[in-house]
Image: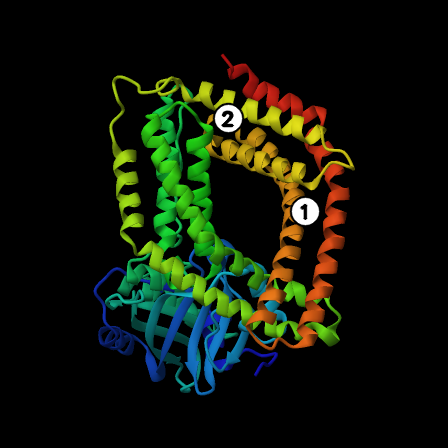
Amino acid sequence: MMDRRFPSRFEIVSELSEKLCFTDQALDVEEVENLISATFRTRIEDISPRKATFYDTFDWRLHRDGSYLISTPVKSGVLLSWHKRAGGLRCWAELPTMPCFAWELPQGRFRRKLGSVIRMRRLLPLVDMDVHRRVFHILNADEKTVVRLLVDEGVAAAPGGSQNPLPLTFRILPIRGYVKAHGKLSGFLDKKLGLRSEQRNELELALFAADRKALEPSRKPRLKLEPDQRTDEALRAVLSGLLETMIRNQPGLMEDLDSEFLHDFRVSVRRTRSALSQVKQVFDSRRTSHFRGEFKWLGSITGPTRDLDVYLLKMQDYRRVLPPSVAGDLDYLESFLRQLKVREHAKLVGELSRKRYHKLLEGWREFLAESLPADPPAANSAQPIAVTAGRRIWRTWRQVYREGKAIRRETPAAALHELRITCKKLRYLLEFFVPLYPPAEIKKLISELKRLQDNLGDFNDYEVQQVMITNWALQMEAEGSVPVVTLLAMGRLVQTMDLWQRRARDEFHNRFATFSRNENRRRFRSLFKQKES
């Protein structure tokens, strides 16, 4: 159920508050009541306790957007309201249950706007809050309310944590025409209670009480590299950051909270493999070979589940490319993929619970924590990282340029796939060593490389999707009675993917020409070639 007006029981908090204050003093509501009653003529009103839970994604996308989400129990289910941190209401809806994803909201503005911010990420509880409010109506001689004071007390707790008291908060609500009454109450709160004005929102107060800090699950230490730093030391710092990302995402991956946990885990695994294979002659070759093999295994066992995540995320796109009258024919395919996903995820959890994975993590941690050897085991170990990184980036860029220039209209698709892999290697190298180069210059190169990668990625994805959709059709036929309309809809998808792949192929030449233009070639040369020894 939705309405143009937000329910009145929340208006006084979100819209009419003029001033929010709190105090560090050990005050309680009874003490405040006595002090106010001794100074003002009052009528006190108790408001029913309010329970609420704040939500955000694991990587705090709403916080980064400057907003927060509150779920409050109501008779019909939950009242979900989306607020700007600076004040003001964005959207609200009464729902039967708390949604986990934006696409579970009813069709409409709330769903579109929230989905554009959190995308595929699950909403997770940040902190629970339980607040009891007293409203002090300050009266004049005629028993008429001239100003209101809202006093909130309560507790807050992080999920699974213990409850802690919220700061006692006071909100002054002025009434038009009674400026003096407002000033008198404001001065009283300042002088008698030692209150100070603060522009804090409810989420900030709840996080403060629960001893949580915004962005803590996704906080990443800023990688610091110095140009003259030993290569083995710098590379260990890069690899340690990747390991931290893996560990942070592992619990969400195991619980399958949303698809991004596995995605970020896999990206860290791929980047680890890339760093070990591209930045050569840095560590002992035997140990490097061992870890490269183990991370290759880790990448292989996470692949099937990630592939199914990707296709399930594409289901709405698949439906949109079909006529509305047949879009529902893909429901059987979606159900089939979800069943496959459950089985593959169970296999993955089993593999990550095995001794081999835990032994890999333990050995990798120990390796990264080792002190620098006085006698470097390889040619580039003690080389300044600026020299090693610059040389490797320059060589990889030249490979990208050669491979791209060699592609013609008649060149087989395999050449574009090879270029895609080489571009990925270049992207990783650039991102590994960002701190060594001027931020604006390196950001420009990465941005333009990404546009080329998007084109090559689309070309590859459309080809893979054609193969996968065809294979699923054969598998569904072999396993049971798939509706004929589903097979027909899947056939239409294959035709669409083929058309889109050809369009991506046509677009490639413009994308590569833009990336490899003279300006960028000079930029690569000035940043990296000079570091070649």
**Residue linked to disc 1:** 459
Residue 86 in the image, given as x and y percentages of width and height: 49, 59
**Relative to 261, does residue 388 appear above or below in the rendering?**
above
354 sits left or right of 148 in the view:
left
Q: Nearer the viewer, residue 371 or 326?
A: 326
Q: Nearer the viewer, residue 71 or 21?
A: 71
Q: Residue reaching furthest front? A: 478
**Relative to 288, does residue 44 appear above or below in the rendering?**
below
Residue 530 in the image, given as x and y percentages of width and height: 54, 15
Mark 2 or 1: the one toward you: 1
Query: What is the three-letter code of the residue carrying label 2?
Result: Tyr
Residue 196 visible within the image = no
* Quarter residue 493 falls in: bottom right
**Relative to 494, does residue 395 appear above or below in the rendering?**
above
Residue 333 in the image, given as x and y percentages of width and height: 60, 70
| Residue drawn at point x = 71 percent, y = 29 percent | 406
* Quarter residue 202 falls in: bottom left
Q: Element at badge 1?
A: helix
Q: Tell me the tag on residue 423.
A: none
Residue 236 in the image, given as x and y percentages of width and height: 35, 32
Query: What is the three-letter code of the residue carrying label 1?
Result: Phe
N-term-proximal mark, 2 vs 1: 2
Q: Tell me the tag on residue 437.
A: 2
Q: Report the colour scheme.
A: rainbow
